[in-house]
Image: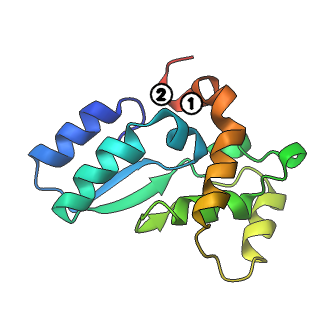
Amino acid sequence: TGHHDPYILTKAVESWPVDSVLMPVNPVEEVMGGFLTLTASAAQKKGVEIIGMKVLGAGHYILPKYKITPQQLVRFALTCNITLPIVGCASQEEVLALTSSESMQGLSGSEKDKIAAIFKPYASRMAFYRGIL
């Protein structure tokens, strides 16, 4: 698992016989690169399963003003060729939003790009788990 440094996690995936890797998968990571570029690529190359965490960013990535919902964030993660999204919910509303959703499918490329663009100006500040604030 890696929260802070995609370069260290990538090296671990490349160097050790692991079955799966747990890493952040969300629009902030799409903008910043590292986990979704280096680590995911290394994992896919070795056939290592990818478990996505921080999908909702502890609820901080749900942005009603921009119509970013929990469902969209899960769909975003599913578009990143992961095996499994781990969705930590911070409220009853988030749980209900996800449990009442219809079948979750990934986003189209343009939908994914549109969501990433919303996060681009704020990505480095929103990557709280990387410890780089």
Q: Residues within 10 Å of mark 1 (few under 14, many from 20)?
A: many
Q: Residues within 10 Å of mark 2 (few under 14, many from 20)?
A: some
Q: Is residue 59 above or below residue 108?
A: above
Q: Quadrant of the N terminus?
A: top left
Tell me residue 55's x, y (percent): 58, 52
Which quarter of the picture shows residue 116? top right
Tell me residue 105's x, y (percent): 60, 76
> Could you tell me which residue is drawn at 57 percent across and 61 percent down?
109
Residue type, label 1: Ala
Q: Is residue 1 above or below residue 111?
A: above
Identify which residue, 31 or 54, lies in the foreground: 31
- Tally the numbered discs: 2
On residue 127, the disc is 1
Q: Is residue 107 above or below residue 58?
A: below
Identify which residue, 58 or 49, lies in the foreground: 49
> Could you tell me which residue is drawn at 78 percent across and 57 percent down?
69
Is disc 2 placed on a helix, strand or loop? Answer: helix
Compared across the picture, whether 5 is left or right of 62 comes to left
Disc 2 to disc 1: CB gap under 8 Å? yes
Identify which residue, 64 or 3, lies in the foreground: 64
Q: Is residue 56 visible?
A: no
Q: Is residue 73 visible?
A: yes
* Residue bearing mark 2: 130
Residue type, label 2: Arg
